[in-house]
Image (cartoon, rainbow, N blue to C red):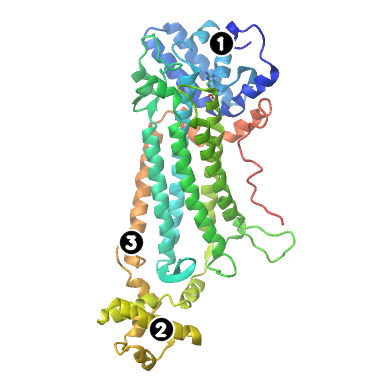
Amino acid sequence: MKLWSGRFGKDTDALVNAFNASIGFDRRLYREDIRGSLAHAKMLTDCGILSPKDGEAIRRGLEGILSDIEAGKVEFSADHEDIHMNVEALLTERIGDAGKRLHTARSRNDQVALDFRMYVRREIGVVIGEILSLESVLCKRAKQYQTAVMPGYTHLQRAQPVSFAHHLLAYAQMFVRDVTRLEDCRERLNQCPLGSGALAGTTYPIDRWETAEALGFESPSANSIDGVSDRDYALELLADLSILMTHLSRFAEEIILWCSWEFKFIELDDAYATGSSIMPQKKNPDVAELVRGKAGRVYGSLITLLTVLKGLPLAYNKDMQEDKEPVFDALDTVEMCLPVFAAMLDTMTVWPQNMRAAAGRGFINATDCADYLTKKGMPFRDAYAVTGKLVAQCARQGRTLEELSLPELQAASELFAEDVYDALRLENCMALRHSYGGPAVRETERQIHEIEDFVAVRRKESEKEEDETPQEDEEASQEDDSETLQECEESTQEGGETSQEGANETESIH
Ligand code: ARG
């Protein structure tokens, strides 16, 4: 029987039951749901709304349910629609009337808003942790290649000399911003909607500050309608993850280019590449390609949720149940992409000599040639024109600027002297670019140190938090959701599956 069957004269149609139920995916929220209920029950007891005896029975009941779920002993049922009603039904089954009192001064609307917020808050920590690991790999690899000259590109045309470290650190900077964006989102979402009730608060003398504090929030949300209505934190998360995936995808694209025979700047480790079923010579960058492809999937989640929300009148509408799967899927995707991408970078072989050879062709020291003349007194625009002519001459003759003899150079401008050859050496061209943020070693060193500090500060903070968090939460952040999820999935909703087993296999056969 439904918890809400009071005013109904008939059972729900079986199809509606299956259609309406969200337990197939919102079972992931079981820890948050139980943690929220524990805080709610304690507050009700502290405020004299529940008797201490009922409060204690509820606490024990909920803790028992939590450990049973964790031990895989609980079978959820679509008859109870969602995680909130499944837990409540189980509790009542186990402790009787006290279980029926738990929902006093609460609605599923503030309950789901709370659970989802806490879930997003926790997962942001997981994603940040993974980005930090990626940053460590980038710093490690960058340190190895600070003097490795490679062509920097614009329009995918060789442009000016940079180091491989400098190029890697460009991505490291993007990921720094991805972390701070997620931190921003986490800070903004940290207001507790519990106590908003269905939408209009409650007549019971509840203490919203107590529950907010117990659940690690900064404060209760200020408006009960807003508390149950908005999902902007989920949108922010999805936007942040979309940007992160854009960065990963651009990086993936370069990996794919770099390991092609056209570039051969790198070679992927055998454990991070795949073969072809017909072409024996093939070694394919499937990991990078999948990361690039999965960016689209995460953008899809953002668009899904934006679309779900855009026409909804306040306050709660059942449409909002559609908020969870895109978020779960985006998190699953990102949390799988980040570690595999980091490991791929960590294990790849870099071929600096091929980068250097590519840098030697394409006149990437032409700007330096013009700068040389400019520093000798020629106006830059004229120096640009002189160099342009020399480049055209070299291109016709299949030579490089530094292969021109001094008399040939002096035919173009008398300002050329023997020291021009030093100025044209790519290693010098790169080393002299020591303007703030440039490719010179001093500057890549600075960036590496700053990023390492950025990572260290956050690692220390999260270690401290872990020390302070009760056991239950530590488990929560370490354990993999998808296992528990999968076991139970079959019994309920079909098609509600969001975990990606199967979809993410990296082996490709042509
Ligand atoms: N399963 C619902 C969801 O995910 C929980 C809230 C239901 N509230 C309601 N009034 N039907 O949104």
The answer to which image quadrant residue 5 occupies is top right
Query: How far apart are the alpha carbons under marks 2 and 1?
Result: 87 Å
Depth check: give the residue in front, 352 or 109: 109
Depth check: give the residue in front, 383 or 80: 383
Lower position in the chain sequence, tag 3 or tag 1: 1
Q: Residues within 10 Å of mark 3 (few under 14, many from 20)?
A: some
Q: Residues within 10 Å of mark 2 (few under 14, many from 20)?
A: few
Q: Which mark is residue 287?
A: none
Which residue is under mark 2? 389
Which residue is under mark 3? 437
Q: Amino acid at mark 1?
A: Thr
Which residue is painted at 63% across and 31% down in the image?
496
Q: Position of residue 474 (x, y in %)?
A: 46, 32
Depth check: give the residue in front, 98 or 406: 406
Q: Amino acid at mark 2?
A: Lys
Indicate the secondary structure of the residue bearing disc 3: loop
Q: Amino acid at mark 3?
A: Gly
Query: How far apart are the alpha carbons under marks 3 and 1?
Result: 63 Å
Which residue is under mark 1? 92
Is residue 199 shown above or below 321?
Answer: above
